Amino acid sequence: MAISIRDNLSPIVHDAHAVMPRNDTGHPGFTLTIDGKTVTAYESQTLLSVANDNGITDIPNMCDDEKLEPTAACRMCLVHIEGVSQPLPSCTTPAMPGMVVRTKSDELFHIRRTNLELLLSDHNAYCQPPCQVDCPTHIDIPGYLELIAKGSMKEAARLVKEVLPFPYILGLTCPAPCQKACRRALVEEEIAICRMHGHAAETCLLDPPHPYPKDPSTGKKIAIVGSGPGGLTCAYYLALKGHYCKVFEMMPQPGGMLRYGIPEYRLPKDVMDRELQHVWDLGVDLQSNVKLGVDFSIDDLFAQGFDAVYLAIGAWTSNPLSVPGEDAEGVINAIAFLADKVEGKPVPVKEGREVVVFGGGFTTFDCTRTSLRLGAKVHTGYRRSVKEMTATPEEIEDAEAEGTELMFYVQQTKVIVENGKVAGIECIKNKLGEPDASGRRRPVPIPGSEFVIQCDTIIPAFGQNPDKSVLDEKSGVKWSKRTTIETDPFNYMTDRYGVFAGGDAQMGAKTIIECVAQGKLGARSIHAFLNGEDMNEVARRLELEERKPDLFDIVPYKPVEPKVKMPMLPYEQRKRSFELIELGYLQQQAEREAARCLQCACPAAGQCDLQKYSIEHGLADNRFHDGEPGDYHDYELDLSHSFILRDPNKCINCTQCVRVCHDVIGPDCYGMFGKGFDTIVSTPFNVSLHDTDCVSCGACVQVCPTGSLMMAERTLKRYAFALDRCIFCGDCVEVCPHGALGETPNFELSFFNRFGEDVTLEKGDLAVAPNYLVRQRLPRGKKDVPVMSPLVRPLPARGIRE
Amino acid sequence: MPEFDASYRVIRRRGEPDVRSLEAYRRAGGYAALEKAIRQQPPRQVIQHVLDAQLRGRGGAGRPTGEKWRIVSQQPDDTRYVICNAYDADERSLAAHTMLERNPHQVIEGIVLAAYAVGASEAYLFTSSLYLEGIASVQRALQEALDTNLVGRDILGTEFNCTINVVGVDIGFMGGEETVQIAMIKGRRGMPEQRPPYPAQAGLWDRPTVVNSIETLANVPVIVRDGPQAFTSVGSATTSGTKVLTIYDYVPDSEPKVVEVPFGATLREILRHAGFNRAEGELRAVVVGGAEGGALPTSLLDTPFDFDRLEEIGAIVGSGIIELLPANTCMVAWAMERSRYLSKESCGKCVPCRLGMKRITGILEGIISDLGANNDLDVLDEFAHYVPDGSLCGFGIHAPNSLKTAKLYWLEHFRMHIQEQQCPTGTCIPVRAHRFVTKHVLP
């Protein structure tokens, strides 16, 4: 007989204690305070996970991941805990009942920002290439330089043509704002970025690459007024989009200022025509010798059935001399002078003449050097110093070497006229006063310093303005106070519906590359307009795209590699000759120069925690530039693995890859090596990742907070799979070393996507191998990473036998 | 003047009987404490005696040892470990080396007593693989103790078991850090872990673990054998007992002295006891605490040697090294050398220590190369606070001590280098051609 010892008769008495909530693993809950908010936590939770669970997600951290054991290496997640003197990392500190935690303070902010500053001080990399950001058209400069270094000239030209239709022309004429930003200048000298795309395009001028295949015809018609760089760029990209374009030009030949404003020795017109031919090859029509406002009006264009009009009429009116006697014979118009020379018409400047050119811009020097080549004696006067000149230093240097006399701080006061002809000009000396609105110091005349220069020709080249007379009020297009066509700043539509404007006419006289950039944006805006999109939405989108990103100036340390100089025509051969002065690179020279590119681009930019937090912490400066080589690291890249690229220069030693490979995946491919400042995460004995036990799972790439581990770009091979012969034996599932094939309840075969969620393919899809969208990472952990586009690019369905 | 000669407890001096063999150690009263504890005292009482004796950890932090043992013994876990830290972080300290070599049985007895007190049955003796004589001596002693049931299974015929594993590694300075030793025993890279949780709660294999320095454990048999009152008769009011110190003269390659002194003795008395009778004019500074210690001017020689008193003036007990610097030392160069050494010894785990110490070194190198600027001093001040505040372990917390004390007591050396671009003692040789410059973010 069993004896029951349980008392089933007495009433059950419960202990009088509060019922604590328990989580799903049975850990008892308690409360604590974070930033004044009372939150519930469970035993064995860390402060960071408690905070994340309760919506406090702004504790920064770069080395923690929910599937990994915390390590507290990055020191970003430090918090104050009441009663503890030192700040403690929330990723390792266990939550305790009644804790009072503060996640923000000036002290913590300072520690976090200094951490980031120190990491950046040895972060031998760059988020976005500064050259690309500073280029108005945003050419993928590291991309095409890499292609040139490999010798793929045509592909490089194609890449450039995606945003710039005239790489050869710009290669000769662009003032190259990209080169001023080049990070190589921090090592020794900037790269000849601009001349490089010129070289690439030169190799394939007669067999031009198309940036992308031309779209089928849409039946829309666009009229483009002006065939300068802005107008032709717009025509080029609209034509690629399948629209019909017709260009109206007032001059006999197309090219605008490229043809009529730039002398032959800088840009040979026959070669220029070859590159412009690429536009006509796309089916763009040209009607020359017709002038807006004289031969046709905007209303006429719409009447002819054009759906949109792009005004790129340029800036052709030279600013006057504005002193007494300016109407005398011998005072000539700079633009007319250059245009007449190009057209082969007689020009007033010739041997024996004495010419004074005023101004400090590109036109000034074009006039100066053209006059020199015509055999005249030339003086170039500018009212400020050489520093304020807008022409490039090379241009000024060349002009002086070719024989002009540069005069600074001089301002014209009066033309001395004899018999209705110029006999000289009276000038006055200047000194510099306070900076004006443009930031340049205002010249102030010194009384009594007047002097006279004997001369017979005066060319004022103080800049140009658009010709206002071509558009009257009836046209519906408004002019701004600065005598430019008024448009929306981002979608470039004028006040008249369907009429867009760009180039010099919209900006005032600017550089060629800025006009090309405007033409490109104008084309996108017009394309969107023709597709019936909301123009406010278009403006918003274009504004976002053009917004300048935050960049960091990071210490580079690279071995010195001297610049390959552009071979130039010797000065003595330039006399009386309009031959092209830049002789061009040889192929080997170009490849060597392009190989100097530091490849500042980082594919992780925008998804990098280091970048994100540095921006958030307003990191204003880095105090550790330009030290000794031993202060920085310059590691070799490991690109030998088929799927995973390693750049230790971007590693911040967070050890997430070490832990995920050891603790989660298992092969244990990574470890920390070295000691002290030279500690770095690498593979055992620093062998190639390819030679480790790596299973190519990609977990390390997923957890990497920076761009140190990246997925390699790859195209998968397609294997034909004859489903009608498959007997679903599962042998392939058995032998696949990567578990890429697996059994599922629904289908006999499934397909696991590397780096993504499992994808179960329908039987009919099996033959169609997906392409991975590389360079994208999955959202990690509980952090707010935007959801990426689907990893498997959907392909049109097709049968196995096709 | 304290009774220096009467206060030798863990060090055997020259002329005293050799106790390296079990027999000799027993003759000198050895293992009496272990017998007494195991046969007469429950573990709780041993812990109480250690608490009463106010034994503070000799490893540098000076935490009460009894408190640590109590926490470990109260953890709800039946597997506990003892780690004896016989690894001198600063290789210039000879304390662990000397104890292992001359007095191995007292160390073993201390370890077994600690294991008995906290209920551990596995202990590790973590030491440097370079102490060849010390390791040989302690292994011989362990074999003897094992043969006579003083270590191993059924110690002294009771049911108490305690095995001792000797682990020898050589990983430089960081090997002296307790969590590094735990990681090394687990077979991981020697890098410290963030505390809390402390090893006493989650240590080796996440079990409660006592990590005590070899000197702390060597003192335990004295406490158990003679009782807490006898132990506290030597020492200061806040810290009882003695400290083993290694003292270096400034003459290169001179033989260091290893002495054991009672806490509370002044630095001047300690130097005199060790036989260093330098006139104050010959000295620039006395460095107390080893590589992470602070430099003190001779005017502070009357400071008592004690945890709190030293920390007040910028120095630490640390590795137990006292070092004399000659009068022609440029203190900027000294701080630079120290920072450079420490920036190479950092484990590389946390950012403030790995990069902060490197940048401090770079700035100091700039100053001694006469490339300094006035704002360098502000940056140094900032980093002297940032590195300890942000660092993960004690290494980073104490790493800027040399910089802090050099700047506190010898600011004129920094000023002279920066403003007059001249070394105050004419001894500095430029080591850099470029100083760090600030560049702004683009745009």
Image (spheres, coloured by chain):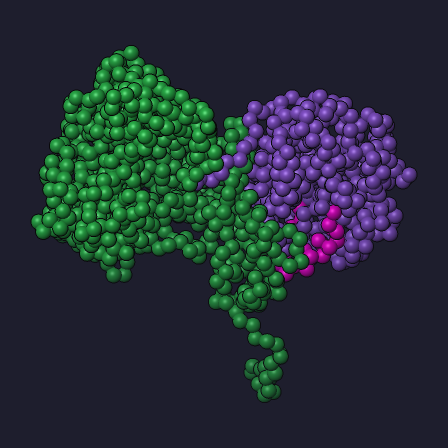
Q: Foreground residue, A669 or A591?
A: A591
Q: Position of residue A611 (x, y in %)?
A: 44, 45
B76 is within the stretch colored magenta: yes
Task: Give the quadrant of residue B51.
Answer: bottom right
Task: Give the quadrant of residue A669.
Answer: top left
Above or below, B318 against A418 in this view is below
Above or below, A164 against A757 in this view is above
Question: For the point 62% across and 36% down, which residue is it?
Answer: B375
A1 is within the stretch colored magenta: no
Question: For the point 72% across and 43% down, which residue is it?
Answer: B60
Considering every residue shown, the one lying at the far front of the view is: A419
Q: Where is residue A768 in the image (x, y as percent from the top left)?
A: 20, 49
**Going by the image, does B8 lie left or right of B115?**
right
Question: For the point 36% across and 51% down, which residue is it?
Answer: A778
Considering every residue shown, the one lying at the far top of the view is: A572
Q: Where is residue A148 in the image (x, y as percent from the top left)?
A: 28, 28
Q: Position of residue A340 (x, y in %)?
A: 18, 26
Give the mark count. 0
**Going by the image, does A25 lie left or right of A786?**
right
**Going by the image, does A94 lie left or right of A513?**
right
Q: Give the range drawn in magenta.
A: B62-83
Say whether residue A646 is visible: no
Q: Colour of chain A?
A: green
Q: The purple chain is which one?
A: B
Considering every residue shown, the one lying at the far left of the view is: A304
Viewport quadrant of the N terminus of chain A:
bottom right
Q: Foreground residue, B300 or A436?
A: A436
